[in-house]
Image: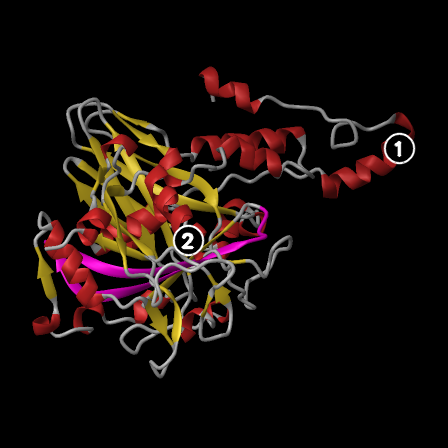
């Protein structure tokens, strides 16, 4: 390789590593070097194989193909167990049929992505100086290049944090005059997300679906009152659970993209960690989907339970959400099987509003009443869910219109639903 890239590929000598052998241990080191000072055998990327199984999406003049090698394929390709290190490669091919240079925002795929040379550096142990240089060269040359000229097609790997289950990610491609937004969900072997087993198209007969005009704010509020009870119930529908404290108005694609932007993770069907979530019901069924997110230290799990309601606002669907914090894992890492609700459920609602707003997913926002069977409650006189756990709430419910494409924070429209609800008609 020539040019600036050679900066990454120089040979290094590290004390205590291959190539730094003292005279007194020369004979022993020579023998050990035959086994320990390995080279790196470059692998040729089978582009045709990735193309054959890739998920392909086109927006305007930009076409992207995406495939994700599983752990075994990754190890065969690189000789490294990257998944065990928390690293998951994504293979992308981007075709630019526009008349301008475009650039790929790797941050949109994973805001904390690993650079190719970083991955190589993390795995340099046991390599000779030449082997280390060969590894750096391979990772650098097989990377996805950010800039794609008019009429060109580029392919390569992006190194992301490993996630369990379906690999979901956004990709933003920028030209001088236009932005192209993509979302991919690549199924991985052995994982079925809970929402994949739900027949959304046949949950409700057409005659039961309430249709509302997007500009009819009063009609929307009345419609929400008809569709949304205050809280979830137990399986028999006789005891109240927790507040349905958020309403999403969104297409299915907008929900998926917003969850990705805000770093919520899907869960597998019948996952033990969502056993408590499946005790909560709306119209006789457990959540259609459950998403979660952890603090970076793993010490707290936020859980968002989602149900499709029999209502549409224009072309968007009405989704009911119940969000809460699990504090049973405070100060420790856990899979959160023993769920213990944070009594301040309004804090979880406020967090979710800010989370989606800062991740540029909210087109419109409002607040209504109705998320409490007994109005506002206090820490001195809390309500209880059917598990006997206390919670307190102001009784408000957030209504978020989610966007398929990013929305600048100051472009979010604030709907005055709360005051409308309090005004006599």
- For the C terminus, the quadrant is bottom left
Q: Most prominent secondary structure in the magenta stretch?
A: strand
Left or right, residue 24 beside residue 85: right
Left or right, residue 28 beside residue 221: right
Dot 1: few (<14), some (14–19), or many (≥20) neighbours within 10 Å?
few
Who's the residue at 55% across and 33% down the image? 118
Q: Mark 1 points at which residue?
A: 25
Who's the residue at 66% across and 36% down the image? 127
Left or right, residue 199 beside residue 395: left
On the image, the x and y values in percent for residue 171 come to 31, 39
Residue stretch in magenta: 297-324
Dot 2: few (<14), some (14–19), or many (≥20) neighbours within 10 Å?
many
Which residue of the protein is positioned furthest toward the top in this rendering?
A: 3
Which of the two residues, 167 or 257, is positioned nearer the viewer here? 257
Who's the residue at 45% across and 60% down the image? 392
Report the Cα–Cα distance between label 1 and label 2: 67 Å
Q: Which mark identifies residue 251?
A: none
Q: Mark 2 points at which residue?
A: 346
Who's the residue at 54% across and 23% down the image? 8
């Amino acid at each position: 390789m020539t040019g600036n890239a050679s900066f990454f590929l120089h040979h290094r000598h590290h004390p205590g590593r291959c190539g730094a052998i003292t005279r007194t241990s020369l004979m022993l080191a020579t023998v050990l070097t035959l086994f320990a000072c390995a080279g790196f055998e470059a692998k040729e990327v089978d582009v045709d194989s990735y193309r054959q199984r890739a998920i392909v999406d086109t927006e305007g003049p930009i076409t992207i193909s995406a495939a994700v090698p599983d752990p075994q394929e990754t190890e065969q390709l690189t000789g490294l167990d990257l998944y065990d290190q928390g690293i998951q490669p994504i293979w992308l091919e981007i075709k630019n049929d526009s008349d301008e240079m475009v650039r790929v925002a790797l941050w949109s795929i994973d805001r904390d992505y690993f650079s190719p040379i970083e991955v190589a550096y993390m795995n340099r142990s046991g390599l000779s100086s030449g082997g280390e240089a060969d590894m750096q060269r391979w990772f650098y040359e097989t990377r996805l290049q950010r800039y794609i000229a008019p009429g060109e097609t580029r392919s390569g790997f992006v190194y992301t944090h490993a996630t369990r289950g379906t690999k979901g990610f956004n990709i933003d491609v920028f030209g001088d005059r236009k932005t192209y937004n993509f979302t991919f969900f690549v199924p991985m072997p052995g994982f079925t997300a809970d929402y994949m087993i739900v027949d959304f198209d046949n949950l409700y007969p057409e005659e039961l679906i309430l249709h509302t005009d997007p500009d009819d704010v009063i009609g929307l509020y009345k419609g929400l009152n008809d569709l949304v009870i205050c809280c979830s119930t137990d399986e028999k529908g006789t005891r109240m659970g927790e507040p349905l404290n958020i309403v999403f108005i969104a297409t299915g694609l907008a929900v998926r993209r917003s969850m990705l932007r805000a770093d919520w993770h899907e869960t597998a069907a019948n996952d033990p960690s969502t056993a408590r979530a499946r005790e909560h019901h709306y119209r006789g069924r457990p959540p259609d989907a459950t998403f979660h997110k952890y603090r970076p230290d793993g010490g707290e799990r936020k859980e968002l339970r989602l149900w499709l309601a029999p209502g549409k606002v224009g072309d968007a669907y009405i989704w009911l959400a119940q969000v809460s914090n699990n504090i049973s894992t405070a100060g420790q890492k856990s899979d959160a099987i023993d769920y213990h609700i944070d009594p301040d459920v309004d804090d979880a609602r406020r967090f979710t509003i800010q989370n989606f707003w800062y991740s540029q997913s909210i087109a419109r926002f409002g607040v209504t009443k109705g998320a409490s069977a007994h109005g506002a409650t206090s820490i001195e006189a809390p309500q209880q869910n059917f598990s006997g756990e206390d919670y307190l709430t102001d009784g408000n419910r957030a209504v978020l219109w989610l966007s398929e494409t990013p929305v600048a924070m100051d472009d979010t429209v604030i709907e005055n639903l709360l005051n409308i609800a309090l005004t006599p008609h």
